[in-house]
């Protein structure tokens, strides 16, 4: 990822992290979701609504949530993420409902220990090339025993 593209993706992510952190979305039961194409991801920002790990809730540090951005410029595709302290990002290739994450770059702010551990956990999650499903404005990312449910930001 070029330094300019990384910086741009991280700025967008950090701006999004400053947005409201209300968790007013409750998943709605309905018919089996149909995944939309990858083109619907580009230019979008998503905020977490629920996270499960090993079948149970995975709490985040108080007053934080996962924010994920997707940017596309020409042939370049980037993903950015954060959860309360540092922002991270990488080039990404989308194949068969899998996000293939390239070299991860991150801001290097000093974070309190809980936020630093949360940043590390999140980068490990994205570094595992998670599966994705997009249905309407809801994105679900899955890797091994972790599921992150997100909703498109307004």
Image (spheres, rainbow, N blue to C red):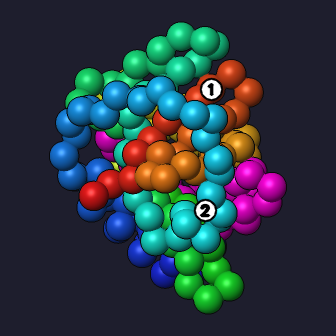
Residue 106 percent location from the top left of the image: 50, 56
Q: Work out whether residue 15 or residue 72 is closer to the camera in this orientation and state it.
A: 72
Label disc, if present, on residue 86 of the rendered structure: none
- Looking at the rendered image, the disc whose residue lies closer to the viewer, 1 or 2, is 1
Screen quadrant of the N terminus: bottom right
Find the residue positioned furthest to the right. 96
**Disc 1 versus disc 2: distance between alpha carbons?**
20 Å
Q: Residue at x 61, y 71 (%)?
A: 39
Is 5 situated above or below 27? below
Q: Residue at x 42, y 75 (%)?
A: 8
Residue 111 percent location from the top left of the image: 34, 38
Q: Helix, strand or loop at disc 1? A: strand
Residue 75 percent location from the top left of the image: 68, 85
Q: Residue at x 29, y 51 (%)?
A: 17
How crowded pointer 2 is (Cα within 10 Å; few <14, some 14-19, many 20+) is rated as many
- Which region shows up in magenta? 81-107
> Left of 17 or right of it: where is 122?
right
Is 13 situated above or below 58? below
Number of numbered discs present? 2
Q: Work out whether residue 146 or residue 29 is closer to the camera in this orientation and state it.
A: 29
Q: Helix, strand or loop at disc 2? A: strand
Which quadrant of the structure image shows residue 16? bottom left
Which quadrant of the structure image shows residue 95? bottom right
Screen quadrant of the C terminus: bottom left
According to the picture, the residue beneath numbered tag 1 turns out to be 146
Is any part of residue 61 visible from this angle?
yes
Magenta-colored stretch includes residue 88: yes
Label disc, if present, on residue 90 of the rendered structure: 2
Magenta-colored stretch includes residue 92: yes
Residue 142 percent location from the top left of the image: 65, 35
């Amino acid at each position: 990822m070029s330094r300019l593209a990384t910086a741009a993706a991280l700025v967008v992510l950090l701006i999004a992290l400053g947005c409201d952190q209300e968790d007013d979305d409750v998943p709605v039961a309905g018919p089996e979701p149909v995944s939309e194409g990858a083109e619907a991801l580009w230019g979008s920002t998503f905020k977490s609504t629920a996270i499960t790990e090993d079948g149970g809730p995975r709490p985040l540090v108080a007053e934080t949530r996962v924010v994920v951005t997707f940017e596309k410029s020409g042939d370049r595709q980037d993903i950015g993420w954060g959860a309360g302290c540092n922002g991270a990002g990488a080039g990404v290739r989308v194949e068969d409902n899998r996000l293939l994450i390239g070299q991860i770059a991150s801001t290097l702010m000093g974070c309190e220990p809980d936020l630093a551990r949360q940043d590390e956990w999140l980068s490990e999650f994205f570094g595992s090339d998670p599966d994705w499903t997009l249905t309407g404005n809801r994105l679900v990312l899955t890797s091994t025993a972790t599921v992150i449910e997100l909703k498109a930001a307004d």
